[in-house]
Image: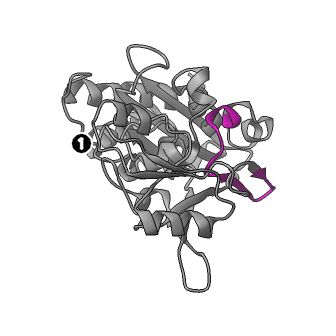
Amino acid sequence: MSAMKMYQAPRTLEEVMRAAGETGATIFAGGTDLMPRWSKEIVPRPAAVVDIKAIEGLSGIEVTDGEICIGACTLMSGLDESAALRRAAPILAEAASRIACPQIRNRATLGGNLCNASPAADTAVPLIALDAVVDVAAPGRAGATSREVSITDFFQGPGKTALEPGEVLTRVRFKRPAAVATWAWEKFGTRPAMEIAVASVGVIVEASDGVIERARVAYGSVAPTPLRGHGAEAALVGRRLTDETIGGCVAAARGEISPISDVRASAGYRREMVGVMLRRMLEDARGG
């Protein structure tokens, strides 16, 4: 097996995109998904890789009153350990804390988790619930240009994203949730962390005088891509969290997902688990 050429620590995004364009190199950050796939020959090893971890501005968490910006190379451990993120968007910090083990979280990046485009990506579900967008840099004649892609549009299918050849995901942004927002995120697997989720659910709701004014529901591992629950949201907005409302939301959720059967679980089991997790979340939000 031939050795790969490594373009170590380019200084700018322009250098990254030029190296990728000239050589067809794979962009590399944490490598926690890529390296096992290469070693097991699940995907072909590229002739070259471009390491982007040292690019200025691609790491870090910026929390303001209105918006939260996270660099694509920010480590999962950084999300987990950020006090500012836990105050502003605890649903994302919680999901990051449940990814794999500490050793992996100290290597894996947010951008890598998204660009891998797994239907089970743990950070995708809270980011969908947060209405996040991603910033993508593309090569241009006068230097790098940027475009914005909603997180739901970013995922195109298993292992496929909206990134065009030569483009680089640079950061993730979302509005800071309202202080009154209630959130929940959970994934189900046979072990708490070191396993791909059989199913996952994320919920953020905002209520006034007991009536839900805004709701976001998202699912993982139950469709070809991480999925926003438009039907479940519609069943909540404008209503109180009565047993009838919760039942209607659960029924809508089970109807809008499209799980498959595989070695980890059957489609029916995944559908049932989504309903169970969602019901518990809404009952907890109601107060029992």
Judged from this view, the residue extending furthest toward the bottom is: 141
Determine the residue positioned at 68% across, 42% down.
89
* Element type at mark 1: loop
The image quarter in which residue 171 lies:
bottom right
Q: Quadrant of the N terminus?
A: top left
Q: Is residue 212 above or below residue 106?
A: below
Residue 216 visible here? no
Q: Quarter holding the C terminus?
A: top right
Q: Position of residue 146 (x, y in %)?
A: 58, 73
Residue at figure coordinates x 51%, y 45% from the top left: 112
Task: Give coordinates of residue 9: x percent, y percent.
Answer: 65, 52
Chain part drawn in magenta: 62-79
> Can you name the residue that lies furthest to the front here?
2
Q: Position of residue 109 (x, y in %)?
A: 58, 41
Q: Position of residue 54 (x, y in %)?
A: 69, 50
Identity, as a three-letter code, of the amino acid under mark 1? Ser
Which color scheme is applied? one colour
- Could you tell me which residue is drawn at 29 percent across and 44 percent down? 44
Q: Residues within 10 Å of mark 1 (few under 14, many from 20)?
A: some
In the rendered image of this protein, does residue 236 appear above or below residue 259? below
- Residue in the foreground of this view, choosing between 90 and 204: 90
> On the image, which quarter does residue 218 sit in?
top left
- Using the image as rendered, state which of residue 278 and residue 261 is in the foreground: 261
Residue 77 magenta: yes
Based on the picture, tell me whether residue 40 belongs to the magenta stretch. Answer: no
Which of 270/36 is in front?
36
* Residue carrying label 1: 258
Residue nearest the observer in this picture, 55 or 201:
55
Residue 97 seen in the current view: yes
